[in-house]
Amino acid sequence: MKTSALRRDKYFLRDLHQEIDLYDRKLAYLNHCEDSAASGDRGEAEKKLLAKRAPLEKTARELVALGVEYEEKDLPRSFRGMESEPRSTRKNLTLVKPT
C-alpha cells in the first residue's frame, strides 16, 4: 500500500481550504501588527507566507476545476470575495422582445 498517494476528494479539498484560510489569517495578523516589526522583516515574512500559500491555492483551484465537490462555507475568506454573488442566488435571464 502506497502512503505517498494523496487523496483527491472533497475532504482533502476542505482541508486545503482550511490551511489556506490559516495562512490568510497569519497574513492579516502580520499586516495588523506592523509596528512590532521592521518593514523589511515584515516584507520578508510576508513573502515566506505567500510562498507557502501559493501551491496550496493552486492545488485547490485545480481540484475545483476537476469537479471536486465543496461547500461554500468551507471556502477560505480570500476566496469568498472573488465570486460576485453566491451560486444559490444566480438566476438565468431570458430576453423578451418588446412587441
Image: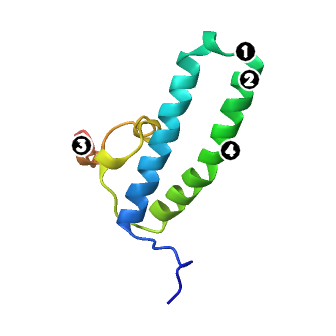
Q: Give the amino acid type for the residue marked by disc 3 in the picture.
A: Thr
Examine the image and state in which quarter residue 7 appears. bottom left
Callout 3–callout 2 Cβ contact below 8 Å:
no
Give the labeled residue for mark 1: 38
The numbered mark at residue 51 is 4
Give the labeled residue for mark 2: 41
Q: Give the amino acid type for the residue marked by disc 4 in the picture.
A: Ala
For marks 4 and 3, the one nearer the N-term is 4
For marks 2 and 4, the one nearer the N-term is 2
Q: Is residue 18 left or right of residue 59?
A: left
| Residue 60 x, y percent position in the rendering | 50, 57
Residue at point 53%, 17% (across, down): 32
Q: Is residue 8 above or below residue 32?
A: below
Residue at point 34%, 58% (across, down): 70
| Residue 44 x, y percent position in the rendering | 74, 30
Inter-mark Cα distance, 3 to 2: 44 Å
Callout 1–callout 3 Cβ contact below 8 Å:
no
Inter-mark Cα distance, 4 to 3: 35 Å
Callout 1–callout 2 Cβ contact below 8 Å:
yes
Q: Is residue 3 above or below residue 46?
A: below
Q: Is residue 45 above or below residue 7?
A: above
Q: Neighbour class for label 4 at 10 Å: few (<14), some, many (≥20)? A: few
Q: Is residue 16 left or right of residue 59?
A: left
Q: Give the amino acid type for the residue marked by disc 2 in the picture.
A: Asp
Examine the image and state in which quarter residue 76 appears. top left
Inter-mark Cα distance, 1 to 3: 45 Å
